[in-house]
Image: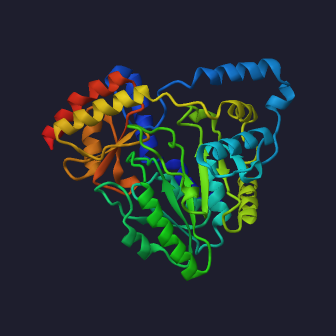
Amino acid sequence: MINKKNLKLGTERSAIRELFEYGKKQKELLGADKVFDFSLGNPSTPAPKEIDETITDIIKNESSVLTHGYTSAAGLFETRKAIAGSITNRFGVKASPEEIYITCGAAAALCTVFGALTKDSDTEFIAIAPYFPEYKVFAEGQGAKFKVVPAETKDFQIDFEALGRLINENTAGIIINSPNNPSGTIYSKETLEELSSILSAKEKEFGHAIYIIADEPYRELVYNNKSVPYIPSIYNNTVVCYSYSKALSLPGERIGYVYVPSFLENSAELFAAVAGAGRAMGYVCAPSLMQKVIAKCLDLPPNLEDYKINREILYNGLSELGYECASPDGAFYLFVKAPNGDGNKFSEMAKLKNLLIVPGESFGCKEFVRISYCVDTETVKGALPLFKELIEEC
Protein backbone atom coordinates (compact mmCIF):
# COMPACT_ATOMS: atom_id res chain seq x y z
CA MET A 1 0.00 0.00 0.00
CA ILE A 2 3.08 2.27 0.02
CA ASN A 3 3.73 4.59 -2.94
CA LYS A 4 6.87 3.09 -4.50
CA LYS A 5 7.94 6.28 -6.23
CA ASN A 6 7.82 8.31 -3.03
CA LEU A 7 9.43 5.48 -1.08
CA LYS A 8 12.40 5.69 -3.45
CA LEU A 9 12.60 9.48 -3.08
CA GLY A 10 12.51 9.14 0.69
CA THR A 11 15.15 6.46 0.95
CA GLU A 12 17.57 7.61 -1.76
CA ARG A 13 18.76 11.11 -0.91
CA SER A 14 20.09 13.47 -3.55
CA ALA A 15 23.86 13.46 -4.13
CA ILE A 16 24.03 16.86 -2.42
CA ARG A 17 22.20 15.74 0.71
CA GLU A 18 24.06 12.43 0.80
CA LEU A 19 27.42 14.24 0.93
CA PHE A 20 26.11 16.73 3.47
CA GLU A 21 24.96 13.96 5.83
CA TYR A 22 28.27 12.11 5.34
CA GLY A 23 30.12 15.31 6.22
CA LYS A 24 28.16 15.74 9.44
CA LYS A 25 29.18 12.25 10.57
CA GLN A 26 32.82 12.79 9.62
CA LYS A 27 32.92 16.06 11.56
CA GLU A 28 31.64 14.23 14.64
CA LEU A 29 34.34 11.58 14.25
CA LEU A 30 37.31 13.70 13.19
CA GLY A 31 36.45 17.27 14.18
CA ALA A 32 35.00 20.01 11.99
CA ASP A 33 38.45 21.37 11.07
CA LYS A 34 39.39 18.05 9.44
CA VAL A 35 36.45 18.00 7.01
CA PHE A 36 36.25 20.40 4.04
CA ASP A 37 32.57 20.41 3.21
CA PHE A 38 31.57 22.19 -0.01
CA SER A 39 28.39 20.18 -0.52
CA LEU A 40 25.39 22.29 0.46
CA GLY A 41 24.30 25.75 -0.72
CA ASN A 42 23.64 26.86 2.86
CA PRO A 43 24.49 30.59 3.29
CA SER A 44 27.43 31.08 5.65
CA THR A 45 26.93 34.81 6.20
CA PRO A 46 24.46 35.72 8.95
CA ALA A 47 21.13 37.32 8.17
CA PRO A 48 21.21 41.13 8.28
CA LYS A 49 20.84 42.51 11.83
CA GLU A 50 17.67 44.26 10.71
CA ILE A 51 16.00 40.84 10.35
CA ASP A 52 16.50 39.97 14.02
CA GLU A 53 15.54 43.50 15.08
CA THR A 54 12.34 43.31 13.04
CA ILE A 55 11.43 39.91 14.47
CA THR A 56 11.95 41.23 18.00
CA ASP A 57 9.91 44.35 17.30
CA ILE A 58 7.01 42.38 15.81
CA ILE A 59 6.93 39.92 18.71
CA LYS A 60 7.08 42.68 21.31
CA ASN A 61 4.72 45.18 19.77
CA GLU A 62 2.20 43.38 17.56
CA SER A 63 -0.68 41.07 18.39
CA SER A 64 0.50 37.56 19.14
CA VAL A 65 -2.72 36.16 17.71
CA LEU A 66 -2.17 37.90 14.38
CA THR A 67 1.58 37.30 14.30
CA HIS A 68 1.27 33.56 14.77
CA GLY A 69 -2.14 33.02 13.19
CA TYR A 70 -3.16 31.95 9.72
CA THR A 71 -2.97 34.44 6.88
CA SER A 72 -4.96 34.37 3.66
CA ALA A 73 -3.98 31.39 1.53
CA ALA A 74 -2.11 33.63 -0.91
CA GLY A 75 -0.40 35.53 1.89
CA LEU A 76 -0.71 38.79 3.83
CA PHE A 77 -1.90 41.63 1.64
CA GLU A 78 0.69 43.98 3.18
CA THR A 79 3.48 41.59 2.19
CA ARG A 80 2.15 41.06 -1.31
CA LYS A 81 1.83 44.84 -1.71
CA ALA A 82 5.42 45.37 -0.54
CA ILE A 83 6.76 42.74 -2.96
CA ALA A 84 4.77 44.15 -5.87
CA GLY A 85 6.07 47.63 -5.08
CA SER A 86 9.63 46.38 -4.99
CA ILE A 87 9.26 44.68 -8.37
CA THR A 88 7.80 47.85 -9.86
CA ASN A 89 10.51 50.11 -8.42
CA ARG A 90 13.47 47.86 -9.20
CA PHE A 91 12.59 46.49 -12.61
CA GLY A 92 10.13 48.96 -14.11
CA VAL A 93 7.51 46.22 -14.51
CA LYS A 94 4.23 47.36 -12.97
CA ALA A 95 3.19 44.65 -10.51
CA SER A 96 0.20 44.48 -8.18
CA PRO A 97 -0.47 42.57 -4.94
CA GLU A 98 -3.05 40.42 -6.75
CA GLU A 99 -0.23 38.96 -8.91
CA ILE A 100 1.82 37.75 -5.91
CA TYR A 101 1.37 34.37 -4.20
CA ILE A 102 3.49 33.91 -1.05
CA THR A 103 5.09 30.48 -0.72
CA CYS A 104 7.16 28.35 1.63
CA GLY A 105 10.37 29.13 -0.26
CA ALA A 106 11.34 28.57 -3.88
CA ALA A 107 10.64 24.83 -3.75
CA ALA A 108 6.96 25.41 -3.00
CA ALA A 109 6.90 28.18 -5.62
CA LEU A 110 8.23 25.87 -8.30
CA CYS A 111 5.99 22.95 -7.31
CA THR A 112 2.86 25.10 -7.44
CA VAL A 113 3.81 26.47 -10.88
CA PHE A 114 4.53 22.98 -12.22
CA GLY A 115 1.23 21.83 -10.74
CA ALA A 116 -0.61 24.76 -12.30
CA LEU A 117 0.82 24.09 -15.77
CA THR A 118 0.62 20.29 -15.85
CA LYS A 119 -2.44 19.57 -17.97
CA ASP A 120 -1.97 15.80 -18.19
CA SER A 121 0.74 13.13 -18.31
CA ASP A 122 1.88 14.35 -21.74
CA THR A 123 2.87 17.77 -20.37
CA GLU A 124 6.60 18.49 -20.63
CA PHE A 125 9.00 20.89 -18.92
CA ILE A 126 12.48 21.62 -20.24
CA ALA A 127 15.55 22.51 -18.18
CA ILE A 128 18.89 23.81 -19.46
CA ALA A 129 21.89 21.85 -18.19
CA PRO A 130 23.45 22.37 -15.80
CA TYR A 131 20.32 22.58 -13.66
CA PHE A 132 19.25 22.14 -10.03
CA PRO A 133 18.51 18.40 -9.68
CA GLU A 134 15.25 18.84 -7.76
CA TYR A 135 13.60 20.36 -10.85
CA LYS A 136 13.18 16.82 -12.14
CA VAL A 137 11.66 15.68 -8.84
CA PHE A 138 9.31 18.66 -8.70
CA ALA A 139 8.12 18.35 -12.31
CA GLU A 140 7.68 14.59 -12.29
CA GLY A 141 6.00 14.85 -8.89
CA GLN A 142 3.20 16.76 -10.62
CA GLY A 143 2.85 14.03 -13.24
CA ALA A 144 4.74 15.84 -16.02
CA LYS A 145 7.67 14.76 -18.17
CA PHE A 146 11.10 16.35 -17.70
CA LYS A 147 13.52 16.97 -20.54
CA VAL A 148 17.00 18.47 -20.58
CA VAL A 149 18.94 20.60 -23.07
CA PRO A 150 22.59 19.44 -22.94
CA ALA A 151 25.01 21.98 -21.53
CA GLU A 152 26.90 24.40 -23.71
CA THR A 153 30.06 24.09 -21.61
CA LYS A 154 32.07 26.91 -23.16
CA ASP A 155 30.18 29.64 -21.29
CA PHE A 156 27.06 27.81 -20.01
CA GLN A 157 24.60 29.85 -22.02
CA ILE A 158 22.02 27.94 -24.14
CA ASP A 159 22.40 25.51 -27.03
CA PHE A 160 19.48 26.86 -29.04
CA GLU A 161 19.60 24.18 -31.72
CA ALA A 162 19.22 21.48 -29.08
CA LEU A 163 16.46 23.44 -27.37
CA GLY A 164 14.58 23.86 -30.63
CA ARG A 165 14.60 20.10 -31.20
CA LEU A 166 13.06 19.46 -27.77
CA ILE A 167 10.20 21.95 -27.89
CA ASN A 168 6.96 20.40 -29.12
CA GLU A 169 3.20 20.76 -28.77
CA ASN A 170 3.33 19.30 -25.23
CA THR A 171 5.92 21.78 -23.94
CA ALA A 172 4.42 23.86 -21.12
CA GLY A 173 7.49 25.64 -19.83
CA ILE A 174 11.23 26.26 -19.94
CA ILE A 175 13.03 26.56 -16.59
CA ILE A 176 15.60 29.36 -16.45
CA ASN A 177 17.82 29.70 -13.37
CA SER A 178 19.95 32.85 -13.45
CA PRO A 179 22.37 33.26 -11.73
CA ASN A 180 22.70 29.56 -12.18
CA ASN A 181 23.10 26.75 -9.68
CA PRO A 182 25.61 25.10 -10.19
CA SER A 183 27.67 27.16 -12.66
CA GLY A 184 27.24 30.69 -11.30
CA THR A 185 26.52 31.82 -14.87
CA ILE A 186 24.20 34.73 -15.60
CA TYR A 187 22.18 34.35 -18.80
CA SER A 188 22.96 37.40 -20.91
CA LYS A 189 20.34 39.77 -22.31
CA GLU A 190 21.26 38.55 -25.80
CA THR A 191 20.69 34.93 -24.78
CA LEU A 192 17.31 35.74 -23.25
CA GLU A 193 16.24 37.77 -26.27
CA GLU A 194 17.11 34.86 -28.55
CA LEU A 195 15.19 32.53 -26.25
CA SER A 196 12.21 34.91 -26.35
CA SER A 197 12.28 34.94 -30.14
CA ILE A 198 12.36 31.15 -30.35
CA LEU A 199 9.56 30.66 -27.84
CA SER A 200 7.36 33.29 -29.50
CA ALA A 201 7.73 31.46 -32.82
CA LYS A 202 6.98 28.11 -31.17
CA GLU A 203 3.88 29.56 -29.49
CA LYS A 204 2.55 30.57 -32.88
CA GLU A 205 3.43 27.17 -34.34
CA PHE A 206 1.67 25.18 -31.61
CA GLY A 207 -1.11 27.64 -30.81
CA HIS A 208 -0.57 27.94 -27.05
CA ALA A 209 1.59 29.73 -24.51
CA ILE A 210 5.00 28.34 -23.61
CA TYR A 211 6.03 29.86 -20.30
CA ILE A 212 9.45 30.68 -18.97
CA ILE A 213 9.62 29.62 -15.33
CA ALA A 214 12.26 31.96 -13.90
CA ASP A 215 13.83 30.48 -10.76
CA GLU A 216 15.61 33.42 -9.11
CA PRO A 217 16.85 32.71 -5.57
CA TYR A 218 20.35 33.97 -6.44
CA ARG A 219 19.30 37.20 -8.20
CA GLU A 220 21.03 39.47 -5.63
CA LEU A 221 24.23 37.42 -5.39
CA VAL A 222 26.19 39.02 -8.22
CA TYR A 223 29.86 40.06 -8.60
CA ASN A 224 31.94 42.47 -10.67
CA ASN A 225 29.02 44.88 -11.15
CA LYS A 226 27.25 42.40 -13.41
CA SER A 227 23.52 42.79 -13.94
CA VAL A 228 20.86 40.09 -14.11
CA PRO A 229 18.25 40.80 -16.81
CA TYR A 230 14.68 40.68 -15.52
CA ILE A 231 13.04 38.12 -17.76
CA PRO A 232 9.44 39.46 -17.65
CA SER A 233 10.85 42.62 -19.25
CA ILE A 234 12.06 40.51 -22.18
CA TYR A 235 9.43 37.77 -22.54
CA ASN A 236 5.84 38.39 -21.49
CA ASN A 237 4.92 34.79 -20.71
CA THR A 238 7.26 34.57 -17.72
CA VAL A 239 6.37 33.36 -14.23
CA VAL A 240 8.88 34.28 -11.51
CA CYS A 241 9.67 31.99 -8.58
CA TYR A 242 11.69 33.70 -5.85
CA SER A 243 13.09 32.92 -2.42
CA TYR A 244 14.70 35.10 0.26
CA SER A 245 16.83 32.15 1.40
CA LYS A 246 20.07 33.21 -0.27
CA ALA A 247 20.03 37.02 -0.42
CA LEU A 248 18.92 37.43 3.21
CA SER A 249 20.48 34.18 4.54
CA LEU A 250 17.10 32.75 5.57
CA PRO A 251 17.05 29.23 4.09
CA GLY A 252 15.47 27.63 7.13
CA GLU A 253 12.64 30.16 7.29
CA ARG A 254 11.11 28.94 3.99
CA ILE A 255 9.74 32.17 2.56
CA GLY A 256 9.35 33.18 -1.09
CA TYR A 257 6.75 33.95 -3.73
CA VAL A 258 5.36 33.33 -7.19
CA TYR A 259 4.83 36.37 -9.43
CA VAL A 260 2.26 35.86 -12.18
CA PRO A 261 2.31 39.10 -14.24
CA SER A 262 -1.05 40.32 -15.48
CA PHE A 263 0.35 40.77 -19.00
CA LEU A 264 1.09 37.09 -19.58
CA GLU A 265 -1.36 34.87 -21.43
CA ASN A 266 -4.17 33.46 -19.27
CA SER A 267 -2.76 35.28 -16.25
CA ALA A 268 -5.91 35.18 -14.10
CA GLU A 269 -6.43 31.47 -14.76
CA LEU A 270 -2.76 30.70 -14.15
CA PHE A 271 -2.73 32.57 -10.84
CA ALA A 272 -5.85 30.70 -9.76
CA ALA A 273 -4.23 27.41 -10.81
CA VAL A 274 -1.10 28.27 -8.78
CA ALA A 275 -3.37 28.88 -5.77
CA GLY A 276 -5.20 25.64 -6.49
CA ALA A 277 -1.96 23.68 -6.73
CA GLY A 278 -0.85 25.20 -3.44
CA ARG A 279 -4.13 24.12 -1.91
CA ALA A 280 -3.83 20.58 -3.26
CA MET A 281 -0.30 20.20 -1.92
CA GLY A 282 -1.03 21.83 1.44
CA TYR A 283 1.23 24.82 0.73
CA VAL A 284 -1.29 27.49 1.76
CA CYS A 285 -0.36 30.15 4.30
CA ALA A 286 3.42 30.51 4.38
CA PRO A 287 4.94 31.24 7.84
CA SER A 288 3.06 34.25 9.19
CA LEU A 289 5.88 35.81 11.19
CA MET A 290 8.26 35.69 8.25
CA GLN A 291 5.64 37.23 5.96
CA LYS A 292 5.54 40.21 8.31
CA VAL A 293 9.33 40.37 8.46
CA ILE A 294 9.72 40.28 4.69
CA ALA A 295 7.21 43.11 4.27
CA LYS A 296 9.63 45.33 6.20
CA CYS A 297 12.99 43.93 5.06
CA LEU A 298 12.64 42.65 1.49
CA ASP A 299 14.99 45.20 -0.10
CA LEU A 300 17.89 44.81 2.32
CA PRO A 301 21.14 44.24 0.36
CA PRO A 302 22.97 40.92 0.80
CA ASN A 303 26.37 40.74 2.46
CA LEU A 304 28.63 39.51 -0.34
CA GLU A 305 32.04 40.27 1.13
CA ASP A 306 32.85 36.78 2.43
CA TYR A 307 31.55 35.19 -0.76
CA LYS A 308 33.70 37.52 -2.87
CA ILE A 309 36.80 36.60 -0.87
CA ASN A 310 36.08 32.86 -1.10
CA ARG A 311 35.29 33.12 -4.82
CA GLU A 312 38.55 34.89 -5.57
CA ILE A 313 40.71 32.54 -3.49
CA LEU A 314 39.09 29.42 -4.87
CA TYR A 315 38.77 30.42 -8.52
CA ASN A 316 42.29 31.82 -8.75
CA GLY A 317 43.80 29.00 -6.72
CA LEU A 318 42.18 26.23 -8.77
CA SER A 319 43.01 27.97 -12.05
CA GLU A 320 46.67 28.20 -11.04
CA LEU A 321 46.65 24.49 -10.23
CA GLY A 322 45.37 23.71 -13.74
CA TYR A 323 41.65 23.19 -13.15
CA GLU A 324 39.17 24.31 -15.81
CA CYS A 325 36.26 26.37 -14.54
CA ALA A 326 33.94 29.03 -15.95
CA SER A 327 34.28 32.27 -14.00
CA PRO A 328 31.10 32.57 -11.92
CA ASP A 329 29.37 35.95 -12.11
CA GLY A 330 26.76 35.11 -9.49
CA ALA A 331 25.50 32.70 -6.80
CA PHE A 332 28.15 30.97 -4.63
CA TYR A 333 29.22 27.96 -6.65
CA LEU A 334 32.10 26.89 -8.88
CA PHE A 335 31.41 24.28 -11.53
CA VAL A 336 34.74 22.65 -12.21
CA LYS A 337 35.69 20.17 -14.89
CA ALA A 338 37.03 16.99 -13.30
CA PRO A 339 40.69 16.56 -14.35
CA ASN A 340 40.06 12.85 -14.97
CA GLY A 341 36.93 13.62 -17.02
CA ASP A 342 34.59 11.82 -14.60
CA GLY A 343 32.86 13.88 -11.92
CA ASN A 344 31.67 10.83 -9.98
CA LYS A 345 35.12 9.28 -9.72
CA PHE A 346 36.74 12.62 -8.93
CA SER A 347 34.21 13.30 -6.18
CA GLU A 348 34.95 9.87 -4.67
CA MET A 349 38.70 10.58 -4.80
CA ALA A 350 38.09 13.87 -3.00
CA LYS A 351 35.86 12.18 -0.43
CA LEU A 352 38.77 9.97 0.64
CA LYS A 353 40.53 13.17 1.71
CA ASN A 354 37.38 14.44 3.46
CA LEU A 355 37.03 17.04 0.72
CA LEU A 356 33.32 17.00 -0.12
CA ILE A 357 32.37 18.20 -3.61
CA VAL A 358 29.23 17.23 -5.50
CA PRO A 359 29.48 15.19 -8.72
CA GLY A 360 27.94 16.97 -11.69
CA GLU A 361 25.96 14.05 -13.09
CA SER A 362 22.80 15.00 -11.20
CA PHE A 363 23.15 18.54 -12.63
CA GLY A 364 23.25 17.10 -16.15
CA CYS A 365 27.05 17.35 -16.62
CA LYS A 366 28.79 14.15 -15.56
CA GLU A 367 32.30 15.41 -16.32
CA PHE A 368 32.01 18.27 -13.78
CA VAL A 369 31.82 18.75 -10.01
CA ARG A 370 30.14 21.52 -8.01
CA ILE A 371 31.93 23.37 -5.22
CA SER A 372 29.75 25.45 -2.91
CA TYR A 373 31.91 28.24 -1.48
CA CYS A 374 29.40 29.65 1.02
CA VAL A 375 31.70 28.38 3.77
CA ASP A 376 34.24 29.74 6.23
CA THR A 377 37.25 31.25 4.42
CA GLU A 378 39.62 29.04 6.41
CA THR A 379 37.87 26.02 4.90
CA VAL A 380 38.62 27.39 1.42
CA LYS A 381 42.28 28.01 2.25
CA GLY A 382 42.68 24.62 3.89
CA ALA A 383 41.18 22.81 0.90
CA LEU A 384 43.58 24.14 -1.75
CA PRO A 385 46.44 21.76 -0.81
CA LEU A 386 43.99 18.86 -1.13
CA PHE A 387 42.91 20.05 -4.58
CA LYS A 388 46.61 20.16 -5.49
CA GLU A 389 47.05 16.56 -4.35
CA LEU A 390 44.02 15.49 -6.35
CA ILE A 391 45.05 17.00 -9.67
CA GLU A 392 48.49 15.49 -9.28
CA GLU A 393 46.89 12.07 -8.76
CA CYS A 394 44.73 12.30 -11.90
Spot occupied by residue 289 in the image (x, y as percentages of width and height): 74, 31
Q: Residue at coordinates 23% horizontally, 33% vertically from top-left? A: 317
Whether residue 147 is visible here, answered yes or no, is: no
Residue 184, placed above or below residue 245: below
Please state if 22 lies on the left or on the right of 2 as rendered: left
Q: Residue at coordinates 44% horizontally, 39% vertically from top-left? A: 222
Colour mapping: rainbow
Spot occupied by residue 137 in the image (x, y as percentages of width and height): 53, 56
Q: Nearer the viewer, residue 104 or 223?
A: 223
Residue 155, placed above or below residue 305: below
Please state if 388 lies on the left or on the right of 280 as rendered: left
Spot occupied by residue 305 in the image (x, y as percentages of width and height): 42, 26
Pick out the residue farthest to the left. Answer: 392
Label total for image: 0
Whether residue 167 is visible here, answered yes or no, is: yes
Residue 84, placed above or below residue 51: below
Please state if 57 lies on the left or on the right of 252 as rendered: right
Spot occupied by residue 233 in the image (x, y as percentages of width and height): 57, 57
- Quarter of the image for residue 272 reads bottom right
- Quarter of the image for residue 261 reads bottom right
The quadrant in which the N terminus is found is bottom right
Q: Residue at coordinates 68% horizontally, 34% vertically from top-left? A: 294
Q: Nearer the viewer, residue 152 or 125?
A: 152
Q: Residue at coordinates 22% horizontally, 31% vertically from top-left? A: 386
The quadrant in which the C terminus is found is top left
